[in-house]
Image: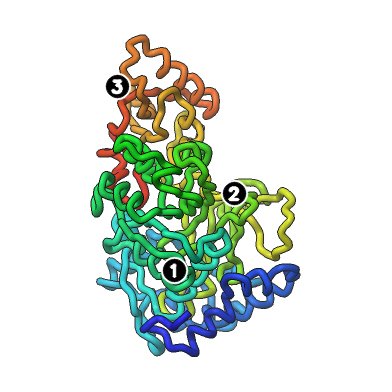
Amino acid sequence: MSAPPYLGPSEHARVLTEYPVGDAFLARYTGMARGVLEDLQEQHFAEVLTAAWDTPFYRELWSAHGVRRGDVRGLGDLGLLPILDKNAVMADISAHPPFGSLAKRDSGPAAQVLQTTSGTTGSPQPVLWGAWGREVQNALLGRTYQWLGVGCGDVAHSIYGHGAVNGGHYIREALVRYTDALLLSAGTGNETSSQRQVALMSQFGVTVLVGFADYLRRLAWVASEAGLEPGRDIPVRLIVGHLPRGSRDKLEADWPGARAYDWYGVADTGVLAAEGPERNGQWLWEDANVVELIDPETHVPVSDGEPGNLVITSLGKSDVAPLIRFDTHDLSAVVTSRTALDLPFRRVAGLLGRSDQMVKLRGINVYPTALAALVKDIEGGTGEYYCRLEQRADGAEHLVVVVESAQALDSSGALADGLAGALTTSLGVKVGVELVGPGQTADVTGLLTRQKPLRLVDAR
């Protein structure tokens, strides 16, 4: 593996030593005691902490909370530091445009890559990467792909976008540098039409799909409409992407013969967790991250098995824009079931929803992004949906779940009523259901153009 142009050979060798990939990954961590892993975390945290004190952002934030240099001596003192989130970062950028003071350094390396978040939860946030932090994340995603079987002889089709977001650039870097697969980087349906994508997939014999399950399912339908048989004319055997809860079975049914795996990450850090071959929870890459799960309202740590916000301290971003106690507002939970793999890392349940997109209806918390598992089996359904929050004449708030189904023209309304009843029972609060035909939610969700489809529309 040759070093990328922005990182010298010796530094690239150090990345692979500290964050191994392929056989070296399992050789290093299989059988490792948790205490040994924590010692490694402490070493990296010391570097990140020093880098953070060099930024005006952290100096001001921590000083305002009464924290002085030397107060935090290790990860055991992490609780002394305040939790921050995107709102704090965006406020800093507004005060110190265009990049904010998080990435300004009194000394040290300059940023090498400028990208932004997708803007799914608000205005896009600039994300700066230094050479070291960038390549650590590339290696970790390459580790994920290799572990799940992406390799020599594969043709990998990527539907991640190539705009200002991390998306397709990050996936390209990881696949090209850390697997022997041939990459076909098509991008979103807005960049390469769905019809053109399936033609290319058939022409080049695509065997691996990477991207979001929503659009990967759509490609299977488009292929069928074009007279191509998924699994035969497009011999996909492996899917490594982002699978909303309940979507795996549908995705594998749409792509017969393929086995689908889920992974999780955010724009600020890259990959954070991934399923292993046994698909029993997602393994946290804790050699590169310290992960806390906290109650969204009280910020108190939750017990294993209980849902909480994922709070990340990135141990790999020690050069530019350190990230310490960053609240993603993504909900997950620690998985406690037994596993045959003897690794020191914890596992999480994947993305369970977003606490900052929660809708509170008559005292009940509803997470729109978590409804995929509840609508997936509707008769004639495509799995696509969004939630519309309305306000009634009496001032009460009401949630309508708009769901795609080939049975949308059922004049009896029985299908919609049945789904509304099932959702009401599962959620513990009454919601409405509106059925629309296949493809009719795409303009609202942005399925063809966005990295992550929108699932909540505020129509109040």
Q: Tell me which corner region of the image, top left, top right, bottom left or bottom right, holds residue 293.
A: bottom right
At x 46% / y 52%, what residue is drawn? Answer: 241
SS assignment at label 1:
helix
At x 51% / y 83%, what residue is drawn? Answer: 50
Residue in front for this viewpoint, 182 or 76: 182
Residue position for label 1? 174
Residue 108: x %, y % from top left:
41, 88
Residue position for label 2? 349
Residue 393's tag is 3
Residue 243: x %, y % from top left:
48, 46
Of the residues under marks 1 and 2, which one precedes in the sequence? 1
SS assignment at label 3:
loop
Q: Are marks 1 and 2 in contact (CB under 8 Å)?
A: no
Residue 121's tag is none
Gap in Å between the C-alphas at discs 3 and 2? Answer: 40 Å
Gap in Å between the C-alphas at discs 1 and 2? Answer: 24 Å
Which of pointers 3 and 2 indicates the residue nearer the eye? 2
Residue 447: x %, y % from top left:
32, 43
Number of numbered discs on residues: 3
Q: Residues within 10 Å of mark 1 (few under 14, many from 20)?
A: many
Q: Is residue 271 above or below residue 418?
A: below
Q: Amino acid at mark 2?
A: Ala
Residue 30 can be seen, yes or no: yes
Residue 424: x %, y % from top left:
50, 24
